[in-house]
Structure formats: C-alpha cells, structure tokens
Image: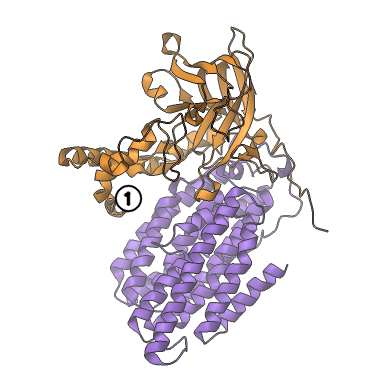
Chain colours: A orange, B purple
C-alpha cells in the first residue's frame, strides 16, 4: 500500500522529468549572489552587468542531465522516507518531546554556503561585507565596514546596510520546502557581537507575489564583550513589515511555513562591524506566555 | 450575520434548483459570501487563503457555466437532470471536482483551510460541500463512472498519504475531508443515497471535531496533546470522534464505509473496494497516531497559552457518541 502510494507519487512527479535539462538555470539564480533581474531594465550601479542571458546558460548535454535526474530522484526518495517517518523526518514522539532544536550551525564551508551575504553595493553604496569561518571552524564571522555614503543616482536618500540571509530550502525538482517551527516559540542565538544593534528578519514565503515583501523583524542588541551572548527572541515579538515599512495592521508570525532567516545591520554609523555566530536554534520557552506583543484589537473601529 | 444568511440562501437556491442558472447563482452566492469570512482576520495567510479560494471556485463556476451552456446548445433545454451531451458531462465533473476538492484538483484545500479560522474551516468543509454534492446527485445518472472512480481512488490515496505527518490540525482535517469526499464520489453513480448518507455522517463528525477543537483552540498538534489537562471529557470524546472519522467498526463512521463496500461488490467492483479499503488504512494509521498522542498516552508537557484553562462550557460532548 505504501508502495502503491509511492508509485503514485513517482508517476505524479515524472511529469517533471522533462524539465531536468532546464534545472541548471533554475538552480543557478538560487545559488548565485548576483541580483536577479526579471522585471526591471534599470541596472543599479553596484550590480554586475548581465553577460549571458538565462536561455544561453542552458546546458543540453545528456550525461549531465541524467546525473541531475538521478540526484533529484534520490532526493525524492529521501523525501518520501522522511514523509513516512513523521513530521520533518523525525518520528512523532521526537516531535512531541522536542524543546530545543539547532537549525543552523557553522562548522564547515558547506554550512557557510547555506547563507547569502549582501550589502548596499547592489544600490551603489560602498559598504563591504564578508562571511568566513571563525577560529577552529566553530563559528561564522560576519564582518565588514558600513558606509552610509549615499549613492548619487538622484533618487536614493539613505544607504548603509549589510545583511546575511539563509538560503531557502529546496526539495527535489527545485520545489520549495519550508521549515515547520510550530512547536517552538523563541529563536535562540548564540552570538558574540561588537555592541552594534542588529535586526533579525524572518521571511515566510507567501504563495502570491503581492505579499513577497512581507517580512517579520525584530532587533537584536549585542553586547560586544569577549563573552558569548545567548539571545532569546520570542516569536511573539516579531512585527510585520513590508519593504521596510512597518505595517499598521500587525499580525503574529505563523510558524508553520518559514522560509528564511536573516540578519541586517543598518544603524547609520560609519565604521567596521563584526558578528560571530555560534549557532542559531529554536527554543520552546515554557515560561513565555505572551501570544503577541502588539495590539490586535481594531484600532479604528467603525462607528 | 448577513454573511451566514447569504450562505444559507446560496445553499438553498442551489439545492432547490432545476435550472442551471439558478444552480450556478447559488454557488456564486456561496463563494462570495464565504470570502470575507475567510479573510476576516486580515492576517497575510488568511488573505492568501481567501485569494486561493476565490480563484479556484471562480474557475470551477466558469467551467460549470460552460458545461451547462454546451448542454443547452446541443439539447435545447436547461434542466439539470437532462444532462445529455458527453463533453458537458466531463466539464461538469471537472467543475464539481474543483469545487469539492477532489484529486487532482485538491491543492487549494489544505492551504485555504489552514488560512481560515476554525469555524470558517468548518463551514468550508461541510456547508460548502453540500451544494456541489447535490448537483452531482441530480446529474449522477449521466456522469462518467470511470472518471469519478479514478478521482475518488486518487483522493482517498492522497488524503491518507498527505495526512501522514501534518502538524497543523486544520490541514489534517482538510486531508480527512479529501479522503471522505473520495468515499462519497466513488458510489455516486451506483447508489446516490449512500453518498448523501456518507455526507451527512461526515458533516456531523467533522462538526463535532471542529467545535471541540474550537473550544480548546487547538491549532497544532502540540496543543491537542495538552488538552487533556484542560477538559478531559472533551478530550475522550474527541478521540472517539476521530476514530469514528477513521471508520473503525463499532463507531458510526464505519457505517457508510461498510455500505459503500457492499454496494461496490454488488456492482462487481471488488478490486476497487479492496483498493479503497487498503488506502483508507493509511488514514486510519494517522488518526490512531493522533488519538494515541492526545488521549491514550498523557503527554508530559504543558501548553503556555493563558486562555486555555478549564473550559466552562464544553459543547458537543454527546454528538460523538452517536
């Protein structure tokens, strides 16, 4: 019966087999650092000029496509096994009893490759940001220089930000996968900063594109000392913003479909910055009973 | 309040119609009335759910209109029971499948249910399924049994498979709904009364589950597991209802399954009957796991929702014992 169901699912996904040749350009924008330009023709001063169009990147070699197909089918098989095992690939008892979970650790270059760094260079600014493994391969060091000099293109008013963002999970055949953090209620970060304030952003990838700029943010104030800090940010504190503007209509974040987490620095102070992260995890803080930190009642009720 | 009234109005119009246009009008009234209900909380996910619902239901209504128009063009009349043109039958089957959420048109259903509040989700799975089912009943003699059986078997398979490791209660109920719809549609061309019976029993059981979940405000599995401290009676009845939904023999939920299997064997479709019973085992496994987690083993953790202390007014403690 499980075999029949697996066959059913494989047959369902086989329709996507013919797309394996186009997988490379599909995965390309996901894995590269350059700005994707699917809608605007104005090129910001900081971004690279497009040397090859997307359709020129298509690789039609047969062997490579067979390998890609094999990897994708392998991933699909693993996903099916995870589905059978329980939520998120672990058994249900594990899910039930889980109180903490480490989501991102930084122990090797592979772990670093799961993150993307960006700065205001993409709009023409002059900040620099780098990400490397810290001492003994135990941490990740995000460092650089913030420069608030405004790019002179006539329309930008502010500048000076750097950020680090996790890459979204990709399943077999380039499908989107999400994190399910509904069992937890706080974000647990073990960081060693330099006293500068950071902003933590959580992106819940929505289905429709009109909500694609929706981001849940909160602040992370670092101490700067030589000691490690364990910062717990409950998810009830995150506020909703869209394209950087805090929304009037606030809602708590729903934890069942989370795509990426990011850190941004943009505190209008010129100078170097450093953030050392040991791991990023989740915590189910039993003592935290707040459901949402901001007003949920109707603020302008109709009379 | 007026939205509930419009829902009732739309349902009544569709049920009592014998002309295609009135049936379509009733369905449209239902769709339009429930859209504000889904997006009432203005949460981005709720709005997303409302948009998905609107798009799928509008497509389905358009297809239904196409089928009725081609039928009227070829046969010259608009009576629902006289659906003679084969392409119209196909189009109508597709349209109703989209409206109900049968595989392969089920993709909107779990997301929409997840985005709406528990009561709206209840309305979506029971009340909104009623008018399309009546249309299917009215036209059941002229529908293509192969297509319906295929969709039904796929629905039961998918409902069981996808429900396996969901952690959100609304999505679980969405997949159980898809599965039950499969059971309902597999028998519709042979004995429509059984479809109606399945539908009524399913609505009753789902209503009691949704209302119990609403009183304890369980939106995810972990909350469900801690509800034994808050309202123990409700928890036990919830367990019985879930098992009934799965179709275990001494409980009521077994009745429609038994009758459907009997009818299918009478129609010489024994392999189909075996396949669907095996597939609903998947669902049974899942429901058992849920009840195991929530009632049989008393979990050690506590919930940190302040509002969930002893409920004073438990509703529906008697309905599950039907």
Quadrant for the C terminus of chain B in the image? bottom right
Chain bearing tag 1 is A
Q: Looking at the image, which is closer to me, B292 or A195?
A: A195
Residue B84 shows up from this direction:
yes
The image position of residue B236, as x and y in percent, is 61, 51
Q: Is residue A102 visible?
A: no
Q: Position of residue A129 (x, y in %)?
A: 48, 20
Residue B103 higher or lower than A290, as above or below = below
Task: Give the left or right position of residue B322, taking residue B135 as reference.
Answer: right
Q: Position of residue A69 (x, y in %)?
A: 24, 42
Query: Local crowd at mark 1 within 10 Å, few (<14), some, or many (≥20)?
Result: few
Q: Residue at x 57, y 63 (%)?
A: B124
Please determine whether, in this image, residue A282 is positioned above or below residue B200.
Answer: above
* In this picture, residue B322 sits left or right of residue A70: right
Q: Does A225 appear above or below B97?
A: above
The quarter holding residue B224 reads: top right
For this rendering, which residue is in front, B222 or B101? B101
Relative to A112, residue B58 above or below: below
Helix, strand or loop for disc 1:
helix
Q: Which residue is mark 1?
A: A2
Q: Total of numbered circles in the picture?
A: 1
B5 left or right of A61 in image: right
Q: Residue furthest bottom?
A: B76
């Amino acid at each position: 019966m499980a075999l029949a169901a697996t066959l059913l699912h494989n047959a369902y996904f086989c329709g996507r087999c013919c797309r394996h040749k186009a997988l490379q350009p599909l995965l390309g924008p996901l894995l590269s650092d350059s700005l994707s330009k699917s809608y605007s023709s104005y090129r910001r001063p900081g971004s690279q000029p497009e040397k090859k169009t997307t359709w020129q990147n298509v690789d039609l070699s047969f062997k490579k496509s067979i390998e890609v197909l094999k990897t994708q089918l392998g991933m699909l098989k693993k996903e099916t096994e995870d589905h059978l095992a329980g939520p998120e690939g672990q058994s249900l008892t594990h899910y039930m009893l889980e109180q903490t979970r480490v989501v991102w650790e930084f122990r090797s270059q592979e772990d670093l490759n799961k993150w993307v760094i960006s700065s205001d260079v993409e709009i023409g600014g002059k900040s620099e940001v780098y990400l490397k493994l810290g001492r003994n391969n135990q941490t990740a060091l995000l460092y650089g220089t913030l420069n608030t000099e405004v790019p002179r293109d006539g329309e930008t008013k502010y500048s000076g930000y750097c950020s680090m963002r996790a890459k979204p999970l990709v399943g077999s055949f380039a499908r989107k996968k999400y994190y399910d953090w509904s069992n937890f209620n706080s974000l647990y970060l073990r960081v060693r900063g330099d006293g500068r304030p950071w902003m933590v952003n959580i992106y819940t990838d929505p289905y429709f594109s009109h909500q694609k700029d929706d981001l849940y943010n909160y602040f992370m104030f670092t101490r700067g000392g030589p000691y490690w800090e364990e910062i717990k940010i409950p998810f009830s504190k995150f506020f909703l913003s869209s394209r950087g503007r805090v929304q009037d209509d606030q809602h708590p974040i729903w934890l069942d479909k989370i795509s990426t987490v990011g850190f941004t620095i943009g505190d209008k102070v010129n100078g170097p910055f450093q953030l050392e992260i040991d791991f990023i995890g989740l915590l189910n803080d039993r003592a935290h009973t707040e459901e949402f930190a901001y007003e949920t009642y109707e603020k302008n009720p109709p009379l | 309040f007026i939205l509930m009234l419009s829902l009732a109005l739309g349902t009544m119009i569709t049920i009592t119609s014998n002309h295609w246009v009135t049936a379509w009008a009733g369905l449209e009234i239902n769709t339009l009335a429930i859209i504000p209900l889904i997006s009432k909380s203005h949460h981005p996910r709720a709005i997303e759910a409302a948009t998905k619902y609107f798009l799928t239901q509008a497509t389905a209504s358009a297809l239904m209109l196409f089928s009725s128009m081609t039928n009227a063009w070829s046969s010259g009349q608009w009576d629902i029971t006289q659906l003679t043109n084969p392409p119209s039958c196909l189009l109508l089957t597709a349209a109703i499948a989209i409206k109900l959420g049968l595989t392969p048109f089920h993709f909107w259903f779990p997301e929409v249910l997840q985005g709406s509040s528990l009561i709206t989700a209840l309305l979506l799975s029971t009340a909104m399924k009623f008018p399309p089912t009546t249309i299917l009943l009215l036209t059941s003699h002229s529908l293509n049994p192969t297509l319906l059986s295929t969709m039904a078997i796929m629905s039961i398979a998918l409902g069981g498979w996808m429900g396996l490791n969901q952690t959100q209660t609304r999505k679980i109920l969405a997949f159980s709904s898809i599965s039950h719809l499969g059971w309902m549609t597999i028998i519709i061309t042979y004995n429509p009364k059984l479809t109606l019976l399945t539908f009524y029993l399913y609505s009753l059981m789902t209503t009691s589950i949704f209302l119990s979940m609403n009183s304890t405000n369980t939106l995810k599995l972990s909350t469900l597991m801690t509800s034994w401290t808050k309202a123990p009676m409700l928890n036990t009845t919830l367990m019985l209802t879930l098992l009934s939904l799965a179709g275990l023999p001494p409980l009521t939920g077994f009745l429609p399954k038994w009758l459907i299997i009997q009818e299918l064997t009478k129609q010489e479709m024994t392999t189909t009957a075996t396949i669907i019973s095996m597939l609903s085992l998947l669902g049974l496994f899942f429901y058992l796991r849920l009840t195991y987690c929530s009632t049989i083993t008393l979990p050690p953790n506590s919930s940190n929702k302040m509002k969930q202390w002893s409920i004073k007014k438990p509703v529906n403690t008697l309905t599950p014992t039907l």
